[in-house]
Image: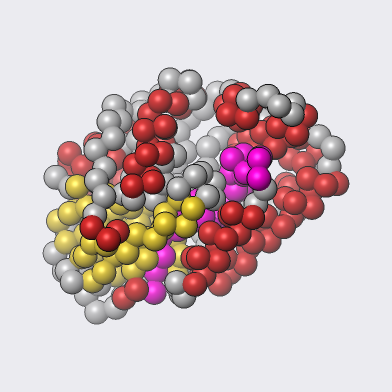
Amino acid sequence: MNPAGNFTYDVFVNDPPPQDGFLPNGEPKRFSPMASTLIYGNEDAVLTDPGMTADQARVLGDWVAGKARNLTDIFITHGHGDHWFAAGLLAERFGARVVASAGTIMQMHGSVAARPLLWDKLYQGIPPSPVTAVTVPDNRFTLEGHDLVIVDVGHADADDNSVLHVPDLGLVVAGDVIYNGVHMYLAQSAVGGFGPWRDAIDKVEALGPRHIVCGHQNRRLDDDAKRTIAETRQYLDDADELLRTENTAVGYFNAKIERYPDHLGRLILWVTARALYGVREHPGENVAKIILSSWL
Ligand SMILES: [Zn+2]
Protein backbone atom coordinates (compact mmCIF):
# COMPACT_ATOMS: atom_id res chain seq x y z
CA MET A 1 0.00 0.00 0.00
CA ASN A 2 2.82 2.38 0.84
CA PRO A 3 6.11 0.83 -0.15
CA ALA A 4 9.26 2.27 1.42
CA GLY A 5 11.94 -0.13 0.32
CA ASN A 6 11.19 -3.46 1.94
CA PHE A 7 9.15 -1.93 4.72
CA THR A 8 5.44 -1.42 4.19
CA TYR A 9 1.93 -1.99 5.55
CA ASP A 10 -1.42 -3.33 4.48
CA VAL A 11 -4.88 -3.10 6.01
CA PHE A 12 -7.59 -5.70 6.55
CA VAL A 13 -11.11 -4.47 7.34
CA ASN A 14 -13.28 -7.15 8.95
CA ASP A 15 -16.99 -7.90 8.69
CA PRO A 16 -19.14 -7.19 11.75
CA PRO A 17 -20.51 -10.24 13.59
CA PRO A 18 -24.21 -11.20 13.33
CA GLN A 19 -26.52 -9.43 15.79
CA ASP A 20 -30.22 -9.45 16.70
CA GLY A 21 -32.51 -6.43 16.78
CA PHE A 22 -33.36 -3.34 14.76
CA LEU A 23 -32.59 0.38 14.74
CA PRO A 24 -35.30 3.09 14.96
CA ASN A 25 -35.31 3.40 11.15
CA GLY A 26 -36.05 -0.33 10.82
CA GLU A 27 -32.68 -1.51 9.59
CA PRO A 28 -30.96 -4.43 11.36
CA LYS A 29 -28.48 -3.65 14.13
CA ARG A 30 -24.96 -4.18 12.88
CA PHE A 31 -21.60 -3.39 14.43
CA SER A 32 -19.01 -1.26 12.59
CA PRO A 33 -16.28 -2.79 10.44
CA MET A 34 -12.91 -2.76 12.23
CA ALA A 35 -9.48 -2.40 10.63
CA SER A 36 -6.34 -4.37 11.42
CA THR A 37 -2.98 -3.19 10.10
CA LEU A 38 -0.07 -5.48 9.19
CA ILE A 39 3.24 -3.63 9.19
CA TYR A 40 5.97 -5.78 7.66
CA GLY A 41 9.52 -5.99 6.39
CA ASN A 42 11.39 -8.77 4.60
CA GLU A 43 10.89 -11.37 7.31
CA ASP A 44 8.95 -10.02 10.26
CA ALA A 45 5.57 -8.39 10.80
CA VAL A 46 3.53 -6.59 13.49
CA LEU A 47 -0.27 -6.74 13.57
CA THR A 48 -2.58 -4.20 15.22
CA ASP A 49 -6.07 -4.60 16.75
CA PRO A 50 -6.95 -8.20 15.79
CA GLY A 51 -10.71 -7.99 16.38
CA MET A 52 -13.24 -9.68 18.61
CA THR A 53 -14.73 -13.05 17.60
CA ALA A 54 -13.19 -16.41 16.75
CA ASP A 55 -14.61 -16.14 13.22
CA GLN A 56 -12.97 -12.76 12.72
CA ALA A 57 -9.69 -14.14 14.07
CA ARG A 58 -9.72 -17.06 11.63
CA VAL A 59 -10.32 -14.87 8.57
CA LEU A 60 -7.77 -12.28 9.70
CA GLY A 61 -5.26 -15.00 10.56
CA ASP A 62 -5.56 -16.51 7.09
CA TRP A 63 -4.93 -13.07 5.57
CA VAL A 64 -1.86 -12.60 7.79
CA ALA A 65 -0.59 -16.09 6.93
CA GLY A 66 -0.86 -15.17 3.24
CA LYS A 67 1.77 -12.47 3.78
CA ALA A 68 4.31 -15.19 4.70
CA ARG A 69 6.03 -13.18 7.42
CA ASN A 70 6.99 -14.05 10.99
CA LEU A 71 4.47 -12.26 13.23
CA THR A 72 6.46 -11.01 16.22
CA ASP A 73 3.98 -8.70 17.97
CA ILE A 74 0.29 -7.82 18.15
CA PHE A 75 -0.31 -4.23 19.23
CA ILE A 76 -3.60 -3.12 20.84
CA THR A 77 -4.57 0.58 20.56
CA HIS A 78 -7.09 0.75 23.42
CA GLY A 79 -9.12 -1.35 25.80
CA HIS A 80 -12.46 -1.77 23.99
CA GLY A 81 -13.12 -5.47 23.37
CA ASP A 82 -14.01 -5.15 19.68
CA HIS A 83 -10.33 -4.42 19.06
CA TRP A 84 -8.66 -7.21 20.99
CA PHE A 85 -10.82 -10.00 22.45
CA ALA A 86 -9.47 -12.28 19.67
CA ALA A 87 -5.84 -11.36 20.38
CA GLY A 88 -5.17 -14.59 22.27
CA LEU A 89 -6.16 -16.74 19.29
CA LEU A 90 -3.87 -14.83 16.92
CA ALA A 91 -1.02 -14.75 19.45
CA GLU A 92 -1.27 -18.53 19.82
CA ARG A 93 -1.55 -19.23 16.09
CA PHE A 94 1.55 -17.17 15.23
CA GLY A 95 3.55 -17.37 18.47
CA ALA A 96 3.39 -13.57 18.84
CA ARG A 97 3.65 -11.28 21.85
CA VAL A 98 0.75 -8.94 22.69
CA VAL A 99 1.87 -5.34 23.33
CA ALA A 100 -0.03 -2.32 24.69
CA SER A 101 0.46 0.80 26.77
CA ALA A 102 0.02 0.58 30.54
CA GLY A 103 -3.22 2.59 30.23
CA THR A 104 -4.62 0.25 27.59
CA ILE A 105 -3.78 -2.80 29.71
CA MET A 106 -5.72 -1.27 32.60
CA GLN A 107 -8.71 -0.62 30.32
CA MET A 108 -8.52 -4.18 28.93
CA HIS A 109 -9.21 -5.52 32.42
CA GLY A 110 -12.30 -3.31 32.54
CA SER A 111 -13.50 -4.72 29.22
CA VAL A 112 -13.06 -8.28 30.49
CA ALA A 113 -15.21 -7.38 33.50
CA ALA A 114 -17.85 -5.91 31.14
CA ARG A 115 -17.98 -8.99 28.90
CA PRO A 116 -20.89 -10.82 30.58
CA LEU A 117 -22.87 -7.57 30.92
CA LEU A 118 -22.35 -6.34 27.38
CA TRP A 119 -20.29 -8.13 24.73
CA ASP A 120 -21.41 -11.70 25.41
CA LYS A 121 -25.04 -10.56 25.42
CA LEU A 122 -24.72 -9.13 21.93
CA TYR A 123 -22.27 -11.39 20.09
CA GLN A 124 -21.61 -15.12 19.84
CA GLY A 125 -18.19 -16.70 19.55
CA ILE A 126 -15.99 -14.36 21.53
CA PRO A 127 -13.06 -16.53 22.64
CA PRO A 128 -11.55 -16.58 26.14
CA SER A 129 -9.85 -13.22 26.58
CA PRO A 130 -7.27 -13.22 29.38
CA VAL A 131 -5.22 -10.01 29.43
CA THR A 132 -1.75 -11.15 28.33
CA ALA A 133 -0.55 -7.81 26.92
CA VAL A 134 2.77 -6.43 28.15
CA THR A 135 4.26 -2.95 28.03
CA VAL A 136 7.53 -2.22 26.24
CA PRO A 137 10.34 0.03 27.55
CA ASP A 138 9.74 3.72 26.74
CA ASN A 139 6.65 2.66 24.75
CA ARG A 140 8.88 1.72 21.80
CA PHE A 141 9.63 -1.46 19.94
CA THR A 142 11.15 -2.15 16.54
CA LEU A 143 10.50 -4.11 13.36
CA GLU A 144 13.66 -4.93 11.39
CA GLY A 145 15.29 -1.77 12.77
CA HIS A 146 12.32 0.53 12.16
CA ASP A 147 10.85 2.31 15.20
CA LEU A 148 7.27 1.61 16.26
CA VAL A 149 6.30 4.21 18.84
CA ILE A 150 3.27 3.92 21.13
CA VAL A 151 1.89 7.41 21.78
CA ASP A 152 -0.54 7.94 24.66
CA VAL A 153 -3.18 10.47 23.60
CA GLY A 154 -5.66 10.22 26.48
CA HIS A 155 -9.43 10.19 26.21
CA ALA A 156 -11.17 9.68 22.86
CA ASP A 157 -13.83 6.97 22.39
CA ALA A 158 -12.44 5.39 25.58
CA ASP A 159 -10.11 6.44 28.36
CA ASP A 160 -6.37 5.93 27.87
CA ASN A 161 -6.32 5.65 24.09
CA SER A 162 -3.00 5.19 22.34
CA VAL A 163 -1.88 5.26 18.71
CA LEU A 164 1.06 3.59 16.95
CA HIS A 165 3.40 5.93 15.11
CA VAL A 166 5.62 4.46 12.40
CA PRO A 167 7.84 7.40 11.35
CA ASP A 168 9.57 5.57 8.49
CA LEU A 169 6.18 5.02 6.82
CA GLY A 170 4.63 8.40 7.69
CA LEU A 171 1.93 6.24 9.27
CA VAL A 172 -0.22 6.48 12.37
CA VAL A 173 -2.43 3.54 13.33
CA ALA A 174 -4.96 5.66 15.17
CA GLY A 175 -7.36 3.16 16.73
CA ASP A 176 -10.55 4.99 17.68
CA VAL A 177 -9.07 8.48 17.90
CA ILE A 178 -9.60 9.15 14.18
CA TYR A 179 -12.50 7.67 12.18
CA ASN A 180 -12.89 7.18 8.43
CA GLY A 181 -16.39 7.01 6.96
CA VAL A 182 -17.89 5.36 10.05
CA HIS A 183 -20.07 6.81 12.82
CA MET A 184 -18.04 7.69 15.92
CA TYR A 185 -18.68 6.21 19.37
CA LEU A 186 -19.24 9.31 21.49
CA ALA A 187 -21.02 7.72 24.47
CA GLN A 188 -18.02 7.98 26.79
CA SER A 189 -17.93 11.74 26.19
CA ALA A 190 -21.42 12.11 27.68
CA VAL A 191 -19.84 13.74 30.71
CA GLY A 192 -17.15 16.31 29.98
CA GLY A 193 -17.80 16.83 26.28
CA PHE A 194 -15.43 16.49 23.33
CA GLY A 195 -12.56 18.73 24.51
CA PRO A 196 -10.30 15.83 25.53
CA TRP A 197 -11.01 14.07 22.22
CA ARG A 198 -10.09 17.23 20.28
CA ASP A 199 -6.82 17.33 22.26
CA ALA A 200 -6.15 13.72 21.26
CA ILE A 201 -6.70 14.59 17.59
CA ASP A 202 -4.20 17.46 17.97
CA LYS A 203 -1.63 14.98 19.34
CA VAL A 204 -2.08 12.72 16.32
CA GLU A 205 -1.78 15.67 13.94
CA ALA A 206 1.42 16.80 15.70
CA LEU A 207 3.05 13.51 14.66
CA GLY A 208 2.81 14.74 11.06
CA PRO A 209 1.42 11.56 9.48
CA ARG A 210 0.71 11.25 5.76
CA HIS A 211 -1.34 8.09 6.29
CA ILE A 212 -3.78 7.19 9.04
CA VAL A 213 -5.37 3.79 9.51
CA CYS A 214 -8.52 4.27 11.57
CA GLY A 215 -9.90 1.61 13.89
CA HIS A 216 -13.21 1.88 12.10
CA GLN A 217 -13.14 2.67 8.42
CA ASN A 218 -14.98 2.12 5.19
CA ARG A 219 -12.71 -0.14 3.14
CA ARG A 220 -13.53 1.83 0.00
CA LEU A 221 -11.90 5.04 1.33
CA ASP A 222 -8.21 5.98 1.24
CA ASP A 223 -6.01 6.61 4.29
CA ASP A 224 -5.22 10.29 3.74
CA ALA A 225 -4.23 11.81 7.09
CA LYS A 226 -5.37 15.38 6.42
CA ARG A 227 -8.83 14.31 5.25
CA THR A 228 -9.49 11.85 8.07
CA ILE A 229 -8.32 14.32 10.73
CA ALA A 230 -10.48 17.12 9.27
CA GLU A 231 -13.53 14.86 8.99
CA THR A 232 -13.14 13.57 12.54
CA ARG A 233 -13.05 17.16 13.86
CA GLN A 234 -16.07 18.07 11.75
CA TYR A 235 -18.05 15.09 13.07
CA LEU A 236 -17.48 16.28 16.65
CA ASP A 237 -18.47 19.85 15.71
CA ASP A 238 -21.66 18.52 14.10
CA ALA A 239 -22.40 16.44 17.18
CA ASP A 240 -22.10 19.52 19.40
CA GLU A 241 -24.45 21.42 17.11
CA LEU A 242 -27.04 18.64 16.92
CA LEU A 243 -26.97 18.19 20.69
CA ARG A 244 -28.10 21.82 20.89
CA THR A 245 -30.76 21.64 18.17
CA GLU A 246 -32.22 18.13 18.57
CA ASN A 247 -34.36 17.36 21.62
CA THR A 248 -34.41 13.57 21.44
CA ALA A 249 -32.10 10.64 20.74
CA VAL A 250 -34.16 9.69 17.68
CA GLY A 251 -33.98 13.26 16.41
CA TYR A 252 -30.19 13.23 16.79
CA PHE A 253 -29.98 9.80 15.10
CA ASN A 254 -32.03 10.95 12.11
CA ALA A 255 -30.21 14.27 11.78
CA LYS A 256 -26.79 12.60 11.76
CA ILE A 257 -27.90 10.17 9.07
CA GLU A 258 -29.12 13.09 7.00
CA ARG A 259 -25.70 14.75 7.29
CA TYR A 260 -23.74 11.51 6.85
CA PRO A 261 -25.83 9.31 4.54
CA ASP A 262 -22.86 7.17 3.48
CA HIS A 263 -21.35 6.60 6.93
CA LEU A 264 -21.29 2.99 8.13
CA GLY A 265 -21.97 1.87 11.70
CA ARG A 266 -25.45 3.18 12.45
CA LEU A 267 -25.66 0.87 15.46
CA ILE A 268 -22.90 2.94 17.04
CA LEU A 269 -24.75 6.13 16.09
CA TRP A 270 -27.85 4.84 17.87
CA VAL A 271 -25.96 3.67 20.98
CA THR A 272 -24.24 7.05 21.10
CA ALA A 273 -27.53 8.96 20.77
CA ARG A 274 -29.19 6.92 23.52
CA ALA A 275 -26.22 7.42 25.84
CA LEU A 276 -25.82 11.17 25.26
CA TYR A 277 -29.52 11.90 25.68
CA GLY A 278 -29.90 9.33 28.47
CA VAL A 279 -27.24 11.06 30.54
CA ARG A 280 -28.76 14.46 29.80
CA GLU A 281 -32.27 13.32 30.77
CA HIS A 282 -31.21 11.54 33.97
CA PRO A 283 -28.83 13.86 35.83
CA GLY A 284 -27.29 12.33 38.91
CA GLU A 285 -27.82 8.75 37.77
CA ASN A 286 -24.98 6.29 37.22
CA VAL A 287 -23.42 7.20 33.87
CA ALA A 288 -21.79 3.81 33.29
CA LYS A 289 -25.17 2.13 33.75
CA ILE A 290 -26.83 4.49 31.29
CA ILE A 291 -24.12 3.83 28.68
CA LEU A 292 -24.40 0.06 29.21
CA SER A 293 -28.17 0.07 28.82
CA SER A 294 -27.79 2.09 25.61
CA TRP A 295 -26.26 -1.01 24.01
CA LEU A 296 -28.94 -3.46 25.06
ZN1 LIG B 1 -13.73 0.43 18.32
The residue positioned 58% from the left and 44% from the top of the image is 185
**Magenta stretch prevailing secondary structure:** loop
The residue positioned 51% from the left and 27% from the top of the image is 19
Image coords of residue 34 (percent x, y): 45, 47
Nearer to me, 148 or 90? 148
Magenta span includes 170: yes
Q: With 143 as the anchor, is 77 left or right in this view?
A: right
Image coords of residue 46 (percent x, y): 25, 57
Q: With 226 as the anchor, is 253 left or right in this view?
A: right
Q: With 142 as the anchor, is 53 left or right in this view?
A: right
Image coords of residue 272 (percent x, y): 65, 38
Q: Quadrant of residue 166?
A: bottom left
Magenta span includes 24: no
**Numbered range of the magenta stretch:** 169-192
Colour setup of the view: secondary structure
The residue positioned 36% from the left and 26% from the top of the image is 125
The residue positioned 81% from the left and 34% from the top of the image is 248
Q: Taking the image as drawn, is residue 222 in sight?
A: no
In this picture, is 35 found above or below 279? below
Image coords of residue 240 (percent x, y): 75, 51
